[in-house]
């Protein structure tokens, strides 16, 4: 059943991409190059819709029914529709944030799954949030959506980040014997693979697609849903601190960039070209080279999280090391222009 879930998700997503590509222009789902987007030609923004189609079909046919699963699937449908409208018409940031927050709140209350227990992060015992956990859950979903959206700056990056997260979630669920979590994670692997093949133009695919806001919203919501399912259940599959390591690179990049914008007196949601992949590009890396290095870093950090879970390294140590890495990353990002200047000076010798 698990292998069939992955296979059905893969085939249905591939078929959905094939069906929707000719309709993209009619629906207004195309990404047009401009001063900030340097791709060639109009690219269909159908990846997110196709992925949701694969997730929905595999869920309807193969996942054991439960109220919380159907509520998550309904929330995912609403969030994807919101993303499609944003891709086609361009919604205000305020409207998007309000809609995302409301859907997260409905999902959290309806499923009774939310970020209530942070674990023993400070070595003083488990940190319980109580009702404040609903607010923290809303912020986590909005943060994850924006983190994956911000990573969608070069071909394959957001999809690869998601692939790493869901792959490691599958490992953790398999280790703990959580078949539901494992099945949903495998379904997402099944829908991400055909998307990435088309996005990166891997043979035999010759027509590029993007996931659009519909895709980043679907991934952000679903990653957090599985992280909450894995850490907040009556029988948790892994500790809350481990969840940080599974989304380390998107989370660190988003947080560091937002802090930098706020210090400059700018909107934290303002678009710019100061993300990790932009820095790699300015340093002379090709898009594929930047994709490889960033993805490899994500794999290594997620692997550290799984190793920490397997060895049961104390929460406070895992959390302290994570904060240390985030501090180093933030400092490096703020001083990246000096590093780039040094690199260019060496090249001119």
Image (cartoon, grey):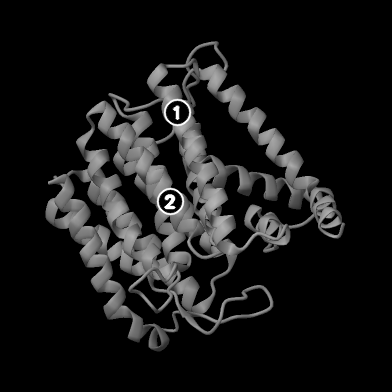
Left or right of 20, for residue 274: right
- Give coordinates of residue 224: x percent, y percent: 42, 43
Residue behind mark 1: 240
Secondary structure type for disc 2: helix
Residue behind mark 2: 162
State the residue at coordinates (63%, 56%).
277
State the residue at coordinates (27%, 27%).
176
- Give coordinates of residue 58: x percent, y percent: 19, 57
Left or right of 41, for residue 63: left
Is residue 260 depicted above or below 228 in this figure? below
Left or right of 122, for residue 119: left
Q: Quadrant of residue 324?
A: top right
Tell me, for residue 63, which label it has, or none: none
The foreground one among 263 and 12 is: 12
- Give coordinates of residue 119: x percent, y percent: 46, 21
Is residue 39 depicted above or below 13 in this figure? below
Residue lying at the far front in this picture: please name it.
349
């Amino acid at each position: 059943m698990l292998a069939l879930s992955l296979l059905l998700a893969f085939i249905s997503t591939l078929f959905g991409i094939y069906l929707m590509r000719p309709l993209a222009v009619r629906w207004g789902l195309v990404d047009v190059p401009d001063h900030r987007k340097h791709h060639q030609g109009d690219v269909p923004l159908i990846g997110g819709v196709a992925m949701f189609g694969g997730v929905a079909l595999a869920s309807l046919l193969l996942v054991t029914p439960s109220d919380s699963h159907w509520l998550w699937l309904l929330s995912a449908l609403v969030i994807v529709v919101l993303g499609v409208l944003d891709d086609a018409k361009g919604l205000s940031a305020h409207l998007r944030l309000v809609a995302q927050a409301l859907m997260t709140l409905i999902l959290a209350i309806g499923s009774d799954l939310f970020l209530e227990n942070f674990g023993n992060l400070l070595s003083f015992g488990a940190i319980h949030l109580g009702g404040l956990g609903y607010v923290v859950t809303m912020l986590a979903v909005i943060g994850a959506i924006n983190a994956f959206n911000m990573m969608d700056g070069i071909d394959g990056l957001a999809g690869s980040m998601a692939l790493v997260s869901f792959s490691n979630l599958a490992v953790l669920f398999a280790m703990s014997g959580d078949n539901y979590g494992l099945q949903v994670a495998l379904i997402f692997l099944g829908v991400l693979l055909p998307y990435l093949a088309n996005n990166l133009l891997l043979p035999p695919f010759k027509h590029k697609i993007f996931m659009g806001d519909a895709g980043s919203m679907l991934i952000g919501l679903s990653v957090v849903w599985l992280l909450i399912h894995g850490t907040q259940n009556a029988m948790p599959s892994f500790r809350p601190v481990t969840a940080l390591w599974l989304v380390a690179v998107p989370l660190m990049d988003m947080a560091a960039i937002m802090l930098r914008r706020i210090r400059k007196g700018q909107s934290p949601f303002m678009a710019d070209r100061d993300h990790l992949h932009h820095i790699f590009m300015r340093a002379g890396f090709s898009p594929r080279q930047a994709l490889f290095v960033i993805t490899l870093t994500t794999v290594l950090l997620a692997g550290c999280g799984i190793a920490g879970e397997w060895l049961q390294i104390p929460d406070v140590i895992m959390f302290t090391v994570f904060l240390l890495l985030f501090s180093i990353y933030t400092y490096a990002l703020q001083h990246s222009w000096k590093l780039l200047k040094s690199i260019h000076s060496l090249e001119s010798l």
